[in-house]
Amino acid sequence: MTDKPAKPAKQMSYPVLKEIFTRFRDLEPEPKGELDHTNAYTLVVAVALSAQATDVGVNKATKELFKVADTPQKMLDLGIDALTEHIKTIGLYRQKAKNVMKTAQILVDDYGGEVPSSRAALVSLPGVGRKTANVVLNMWFKQPAQAVDTHIFRIGHRTGICPGKDVDAVERAIEDNIPAEFQHHAHHWLILHGRYVCKARKPMCSNCLIRDLCLFEDKNL
């Protein structure tokens, strides 16, 4: 996490947060994640592969992979060599391939080939951290789990929406302060805003729909 501002914003008030997320919802009522998947298992694999990689790159690699291996058993049948060939364009692909195969084996052996809906069970899988688990819980199991990535950490800290010294603190700030009606889609709205508007080096403040509410002192207007 190297792109947070030196001076974090203060936590916004509840009415301001409600107005911000109302605007986000009005702009995009049903925000979607940008990783392609067909079921809970392919979502787990896609998110795990996305660490230190772009969603575009992961989608390109998994397009053919998921046609032949969209369940844990099919992944085991495919084998690590073929899996490695599919994902070799992704960063850290060798270690990720090992983790994907280990996870597939655990899911077959311990969960009947199904992806568990428990965060504790998910984070016990190789290569699945809290962020990956929260993405799966949110996107597939419809739980209000908050997956904090570099975009959310940056803009949460910068704007005052959900400031915190680390990703755990930012996650808690979302859960504790953002109105309940927005919790399910909160992390998607924040990711999209951070990816396309509130960018790391050159935030597009002049095109920002919440610039009048943002607490960032160095707005680029």
Image (cartoon, rainbow, N blue to C red):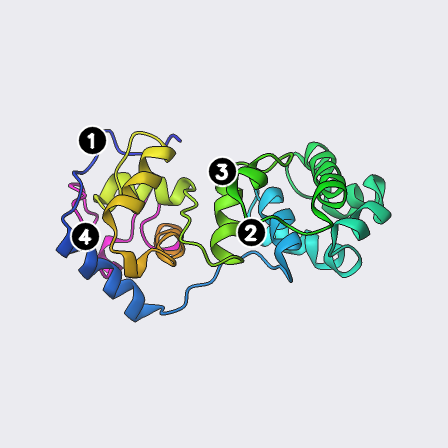
Q: Quadrant of residue 69?
A: bottom right
Q: Tell me if label 2 and label 4 are in contact, CB under 8 Å.
A: no
Which numbered disc covers residue 55?
A: 2
Q: Quadrant of the N terminus?
A: top left
Q: Amino acid at mark 1?
A: Lys
Left or right of residue 68, residue 43 in this image: left
Left or right of residue 215, residue 99 in this image: right
Q: From mark 3 to mark 1, how far is it between C-alphas? A: 27 Å
Q: Amino acid at mark 3?
A: Arg
Which numbered disc covers residue 221?
A: 4
Q: From mark 2 to mark 4, how far is it between C-alphas? A: 29 Å
Residue 69 vertical placement versus 171 (above, below): below
**Mark 4 secondary-structure assignment:** loop
- The x, y position of residue 206, in whole percent, is 22, 57
**Mark 3 secondary-structure assignment:** helix
Q: From mark 3 to mark 2, how far is it between C-alphas? A: 18 Å
Decide which of tag 3 and tag 4 comes sooner along the chain: 3
Q: From mark 4 to mark 1, how far is it between C-alphas? A: 19 Å
Q: Main secondary structure of the magenta part?
A: loop
Residue that mark 3 sits on: 130
Q: From mark 1 to mark 2, how far is it between C-alphas? A: 30 Å
Q: Between tags 3 and 4, which lies in front? A: 3
Regarding residue 85, the answer to whether it shows in the image is yes
Few, some or many residues within 10 Å of mark 1 (<14, 14–19, 20+): few
Residue that mark 1 sits on: 7
Q: Between tags 4 and 1, which lies in front? A: 1
Q: Which residues are magenta?
A: 196-221
Query: What residue sits 66% from the left and 53% below the top?
Result: 41
The mark tally for this picture is 4
Q: Between tags 3 and 2, which lies in front? A: 3
Decide which of tag 2 and tag 4 comes sooner along the chain: 2
Few, some or many residues within 10 Å of mark 3 (<14, 14–19, 20+): some
